[in-house]
Image (spheres, grey):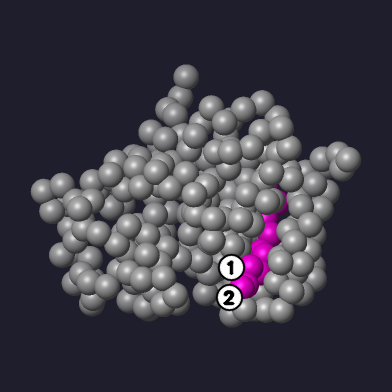
C-alpha cells in the first residue's frame, strides 16, 4: 500500500518550505506584511469514499490566512502547525460570511448529494497572501518568489487526484494570465462558455477544468446571479463527468 495523501502532501510542503525561516521570507518579500501559507489537508475517508466526486477548488490568494508567526519551530516553518490551521478551518464550515466557501459547498453538495462535508479540497494559486483581508493580490515580489520557489500546484494535483478542478479566480483574460497561468503555464487554453464560466484545458492535466467568476457582494441581485453561476457550473460538471441529472 502506498503513502497516504496527507503524508505525500506533508512531504511536498516540507521539501519546499521546511528549510525557510520567517526572516528568510521577510527578506525575499521585502515586507513582513504577509499571511502564512495555506497548506492542504485531506479528510481521506470522506474524500476517497466510494462514488464521491473529488472536487478541487482553487481560489486566488490567502489574504489574512493565519497572519501570526507562531508557526515556526526554531525559527523555521513547522509544516504540521500550518496544516493544522487548514484542519481547524474545516473548509470554511464556520465561515458563514464567505461567498467563496458558500459557493464551494453549494457546488460540492449538488454534485455529491449523498456525501457532504469534508469530501472536497480547496487551495489557492498564491499560498501566501496579504496580512489583512480586502488588500488585493500579494505584491509582485511574493508572486514571483512563489513562481520560482513554490511552484507545486501540479504536484498537489498529482497527489490528490481530483476528478474535476474549478478555479474561482475571475472572468477576465488578465485573470487567466495572473492566476491560472501562474500554476499551469502559458500553454493553457481558456474557452469562454458564458460571461461567468470558461473551460480550461492544459496538456499536463487530463481531468475537466473550469474557471468561474468570483461571487461578488457588490453587484445587484448577487444572490440570484451567484446561484445561476453555481447552477451552470454544476450542469457542466455533470455533463463532463457523464453524471446522471435527476
In front here: 107 or 75? 107
Q: Which residues are magenta?
A: 205-217
Q: Is residue 228 left or right of residue 6?
A: right
Q: Is residue 232 left or right of residue 121?
A: right
Distance from disc 1 to disc 2, alpha carbons, whole Å, reads 7 Å
**Looking at the picture, how far across and down is residue 15, in whole percent?**
30, 46
| Number of the label disc, if any, that sits on residue 169 | 1
Which SS class for mark 1? loop
Point 39% across, 43% down: residue: 88
Point 52% across, 47% down: residue: 93
**Looking at the picture, how far across and down is residue 200, in whole percent?**
68, 62
Instruction: Look at the picture and state if 155 lies above or below 173.
Output: above
What residue sits right under mark 2 in the picture?
A: 175
Which SS class for mark 2? helix
Locate the C terminus and report the quarter of the image it occupies: top right
Point 75% across, 69% down: residue: 225
Amino acid at each position: 500500500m502506498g503513502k497516504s495523501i496527507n503524508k505525500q502532501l506533508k512531504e511536498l510542503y516540507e521539501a519546499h518550505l521546511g528549510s525557510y525561516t520567517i526572516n528568510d521570507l521577510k527578506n525575499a518579500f521585502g515586507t513582513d506584511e504577509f499571511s502564512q501559507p495555506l497548506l492542504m489537508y485531506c479528510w481521506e475517508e470522506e474524500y476517497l469514499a466510494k462514488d464521491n466526486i473529488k472536487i478541487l477548488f482553487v481560489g486566488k490568494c490567502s489574504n489574512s490566512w493565519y497572519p501570526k508567526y507562531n508557526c515556526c519551530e526554531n525559527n523555521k516553518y513547522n509544516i504540521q502547525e500550518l496544516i493544522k490551521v487548514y484542519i481547524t478551518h474545516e473548509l470554511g464550515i464556520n465561515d458563514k460570511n464567505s461567498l467563496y466557501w458558500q459557493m464551494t459547498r453549494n457546488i460540492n453538495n449538488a454534485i455529491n448529494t449523498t456525501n457532504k462535508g469534508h469530501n472536497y479540497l480547496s487551495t489557492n494559486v498564491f499560498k501566501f497572501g496579504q496580512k489583512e483581508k480586502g488588500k488585493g493580490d500579494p505584491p509582485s515580489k511574493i508572486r514571483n518568489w512563489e513562481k520560482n520557489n513554490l511552484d507545486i500546484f501540479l504536484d498537489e494535483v498529482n497527489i490528490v487526484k481530483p476528478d474535476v478542478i474549478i478555479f474561482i479566480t475571475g472572468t477576465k483574460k488578465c485573470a487567466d494570465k495572473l492566476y491560472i497561468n501562474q500554476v499551469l503555464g502559458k500553454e493553457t487554453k481558456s474557452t469562454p462558455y458564458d460571461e461567468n464560466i470558461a473551460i480550461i484545458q492544459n496538456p499536463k492535466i487530463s481531468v475537466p477544468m473550469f474557471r468561474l467568476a468570483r461571487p461578488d457582494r457588490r453587484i445587484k441581485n448577487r444572490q440570484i446571479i451567484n446561484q445561476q453561476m453555481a447552477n451552470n457550473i454544476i450542469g457542466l460538471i455533470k455533463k463532463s463527468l457523464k453524471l446522471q441529472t435527476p
